[in-house]
Amino acid sequence: MDDLRTMQSADTPFFKEDGAFCSAAIFASMASTFCCREDSLLTLEPSGTSLTSVLGYSADEVTYTFHNHLVELILPEDRPMFLEKLPQANASSTESEFACRFSHKDGRQIWALVKCRRITDSQGNGYFCGILTDISYSKAAQDDLKNHLEQLNIVLSQTENIIFEWNLETDT
């Protein structure tokens, strides 16, 4: 909760005056929509794309810097996995959900949960439409927990004594 408070800015308050959590503001600032053609570069369709809230880029920046290609926003080492996880034309499922890393305008690498669906228009052209949700904070917490668990396992494997915690004040 404190992490969310530090992310708060004047234009997207996460907490109301009384301290109540505002989930709509969180969602709006941590998720973006996209719609792109089913081509090798995943060319973004301007009418169905809003990457500003998650990646920080304006529509013009996506057009001129990244040539409207979603692939160029994905970290190079994650591109093959991203393309592999997209729903294929002949697959039984038209939906996909996975996590990958994107480059943010400020230079950070962010983790995003990608949920997308493959759709086809009346001419048979394929498109991927979906949502990117910033999961960087939960991914960092998950990594911290994994590291802590590894440390505990090392300590436990190198000891002959039983380790336990005891709260002397409550005798538990």
Image: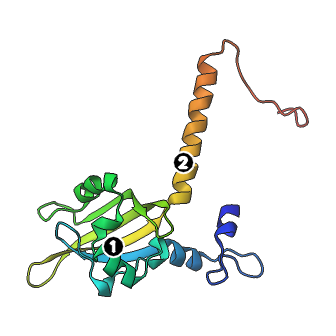
Work out which quarter of the rendered image holds the N terminus and state it.
bottom right
Instruction: Return the residue found at the far front.
Output: 65
Residue 115: x and y, percent? 35, 66
Q: Secondary structure at mark 2?
A: helix
Quick check: 32 above or below 114? below
User: Which amino acid is tagged 2?
Assistant: Gln
Q: Is residue 92 left or right of residue 18?
A: left
Q: Which residue is mark 1?
A: 130
Q: Is residue 94 left or right of residue 144?
A: left
- Residue drawn at x 66%, y 15% is 159
User: Which amino acid is tagged 1?
Assistant: Gly
Q: Quadrant of residue 10?
A: bottom right
- Residue drawn at x 54%, y 56% is 138
Q: Which residue is mark 2?
A: 142
Instruction: Return the residue found at the far bottom.
Output: 47
Q: Is residue 127 left or right of residue 143?
A: left
Say whether residue 1 is visible. no
Rate crowding at label 2 as few (under 14), some (14 to 19) or many (20 or more) other CA atoms within 10 Å.
Answer: few
Residue 108: x and y, percent? 50, 61
- Residue drawn at x 40%, y 62% is 102
Q: Secondary structure at mark 1?
A: strand
